[in-house]
Image (spheres, helix red, strand yellow):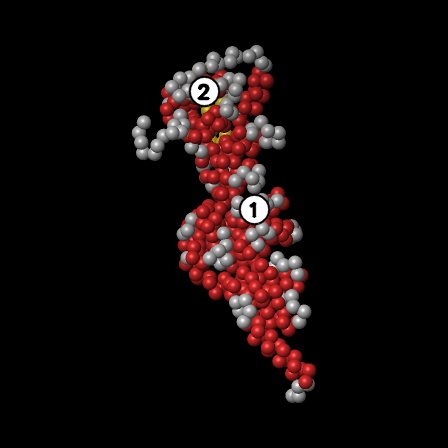
Amino acid sequence: MEWSRTGILCLFALLTCQVAVGEESASVLVQQLGHPSFQVRVAAEQELLTRGMDGLRAAGLGAKSNDPEIRRRSQRLVSVLQKLAFIEQQERVRNDPWMAGEELAPAWEFYQSIASDSPAARNLYVKMIEQESELMTSVVLRPKEWTLDFERRCADLRTFVDRRISRDLNTASIMTLLFLALHPDNRMSPLSSGTVGSLISDTEFYSTVMRAPVDEREVYVAFLSQWVESSGHSSPASRLQLASKFQLKAGVAPALEILSNYKSVGLSRTQLQNAIGFLAVYGSIDVVPELEKLLDPERYQTPTLETDGSFSIPEPRPESLRSKSEQTAEAQQTLLVNDTALLAILRITKQDPSKYGFANMRIDNQQRAPIVNASFATDGARRLALSQWLAWRIEHARQLLPPPSDASEGVET
């Protein structure tokens, strides 16, 4: 094979360039990605691929360059170098993410603050980086722009509205989106919030979580609970529905939100009843005062419990002269709110509802969405039950008092 003089000179120039490139720092190599010579650009790109984490950091900076050629080549390098670096250091991240460095273990400190630092948590974390390496590492490489990458990822998923998007994603990818949605620096849009909410509510995801080993399921539950407790992501009703589906005690938070806004426009009685039912199963003694607010204010006013234990007991309202049909309509109206609230209170305080005169009673602890049904035979029976509850409340005042705000743990008062 004969070489022309021009060809030999070009080859010599390329070899000389590659030798020179090998001696340059990673930051200089990134600048050479925009060199007028194609050979210089290619050689710099190839050399950066051998520089490991130094090349990744430099390319991450180059991805923000105003030079379109440097920016385009750097972005391409970042994608490749991220995968190479993580593959090489995967076991290091799995064994000790604290020592792996932020580039290999992005946002690990925040991750473990939710999931803890168990082997199962680390294993899922590694899977998340494997599946969504560009999105995860952008938290470090693009600290001011990674939330835009998150929005674009969610927008891409919304383009496939004609099919179940969770089937196109494995659990690790869904968990990555959930994790980054919870990140304190992420002020995601309502559309992205809806996308994440749809993913974690999907039947396929639910089945995967419930089939997972106990230690792994605990990690999923930790993140789902964090979503349920965070009021800024979605409506209380949707978060309560998710909590009921996964049987998450964290649903107490959105249930109380619903109770505190029970007079709001648009809040259905079904939503209110679901909140009461959830509190009946998962609530503690602390939620009793909120449930008491739902008892019929015309017939029963919850007395203010003073620090000295005294009460101001209201007189019961006299029987009105309403017609029988009006009384029946009112009884049906109060069925979903007042009576179920009292039934929930009785369950939380471990009392027998039959002793309060409930004609029908059901609290289903096995349902993912606990249902509470309650009714009285007569309106008079309802008033009697409310008076009976007031008497019990007075007798057990200390049990219902909140702990002193200045009480010290382990110190008797």
Q: 149 or 311: which is nearer to us?
A: 149
Horizontal and vertical percent position of residue 219: 45, 49
Residue density around tag 2, few if under 14, some if 14–19, many if 20 or more, within 10 Å: few
Horizontal and vertical percent position of residue 354: 42, 25
Amino acid on which disc 2 is placed: Thr
Q: Residue at x 55, y 36 (%)?
A: 236
Quarter of the image that includes the C terminus = top left
Indicate whether 97 appears above or below 396: below
Residues marked 1 and 2 touching at CB (< 8 Å): no
Residue 308: assigned label: none
Amino acid on which disc 1 is placed: Asn
Indicate whether 24 appears above or below 216: below
In primary-sequence order, the first of circles 1 and 2 is: 1
Q: Residue furthest bottom?
A: 2
Q: Residue at x 51, y 13 (%)?
A: 317
Q: Which residue is mark 2?
A: 304
Q: 363 or 235: which is nearer to us?
A: 235
- Image depth: mark 1 or mark 2 in front: 1
Horizontal and vertical percent position of residue 408: 35, 32
Q: Secondary structure at mark 2?
A: loop
Q: Residue at x 46, y 26 (%)?
A: 289
Q: Is residue 351 visible?
A: no
Q: Which residue is mark 1?
A: 186
Q: 385 or 1: which is nearer to us?
A: 1
Q: 374 or 139: which is nearer to us?
A: 139
Horizontal and vertical percent position of residue 357: 44, 22
Residue density around tag 1, few if under 14, some if 14–19, many if 20 or more, within 10 Å: some
